[in-house]
Amino acid sequence: MTMMTLCIDCGGMSIKASVLDSAGTMHAQPIQLPTPYPLSPVRLLELFAELADQLPAFDRVTVGVPGMIRHGVVVHTPHYINVKGPRTRVDPDLLQQWRGFDLAQALRNQFNRPALVLNDAEVHGAGVVAGSGLEIVVTLGTGLGFSMFDGGKLAPHIELSHAPIRRATSYDTWIGEHERRRLGDSFWSRRIRSMVVDLRPVFHWDRLYIGGGNSRRIRPEIIEQLGEDVVIVPNSAGIVGGVRAWLMVDQNLS
């Protein structure tokens, strides 16, 4: 019998879900809902239930969430601690509710199913990596997502999005959606090229994958300059990776 997985991809602007079989085939068209704000852990779990009610039956759950997730527990999440989402003020009450929230256990209790909770870029990466060498995945959307795989196994998470760039800001802000809209795709694409140039000597990757909703906005002429070790991948990996993630995660890291 095939194992059916409810895969949920949480973003700053929308939350998508579908149910996939063990081969990664979707058994329903993905459902997408706007991310509601303010967003408490309880409200997010209610949203998960709403999505699950509209999808086929499943045997386990995979959820990708922005931020630092350790052993299924939220260490820090951007956006969801803010009053009205990305780039709005932090709500101290939401900050307290999210800090240390065991989302994986809450999902197990809610659905009575095994649950895996990872950073959203880690789930995305699980859907695209080849499983050989050092593979880096960055996702471009509201901000910057990052994950790293060594020989097909997920490495401990690094919040590269918070690393300083050009002194005055972080990667999350420098190449996030707000800056893309302000600069336009051409100038923003040059920043993506600069990021790749800066990070290559840091990681010495065998392959870099660039995904997320904004990866399709990188100008073709810039893509040609990124190098043969850089691959642009579809955003659908954020859901498809929910199946492969179970095979790639060392349970000591999950």
Image (tube, grey):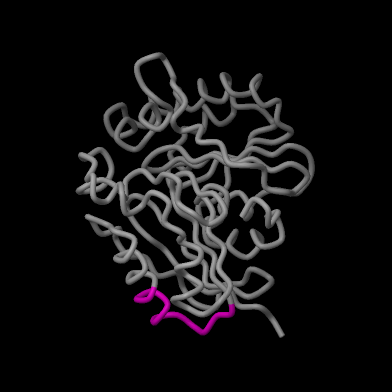
Please, is residue 130 above or below residue 113 in the view?
Answer: above
In this view of the protein, which residue sits in the foreground, 105 or 209?
105
Say which quarter of the image contains residue 53. bottom left
Is 54 one of the magenta-colored residues?
yes
Which residue range is magenta in the image? 49-59
In this view of the protein, which residue sits in the foreground, 104 or 130?
104
In what quadrant of the picture does the N terminus appear? Answer: bottom right
- The x and y percentages for residue 189 are 44, 28
At a point 54% along the width and 51% down the height, the residue shown is: 234
**Number of residue marks:** 0
Please, is residue 94 above or below residue 30 in the view?
Answer: above
- The x and y percentages for residue 15 are 38, 60
In this view of the protein, which residue sits in the foreground, 184 or 237?
237
In what quadrant of the picture does the C terminus appear? Answer: bottom right
Q: Residue 167 vs residue 244: left or right?
A: left
Say which quarter of the image contains residue 113. bottom right
Say which quarter of the image contains residue 149. top right
Please, is residue 129 above or below residue 208 in the view?
Answer: below
Q: Residue 102 vs residue 91: left or right?
A: right
Is 243 one of the magenta-colored residues?
no
At a point 47% along the width and 43% down the height, the residue shown is: 216
At a point 49% along the width and 54% down the height, the residue shown is: 73
Q: Residue 167 vs residue 93: left or right?
A: right
- The x and y percentages for residue 141 are 41, 43
At a point 20% along the width and 48% down the height, the residue shown is: 83
Please, is residue 141 above or below residue 196 in the view?
Answer: below
- The x and y percentages for residue 229 are 69, 32
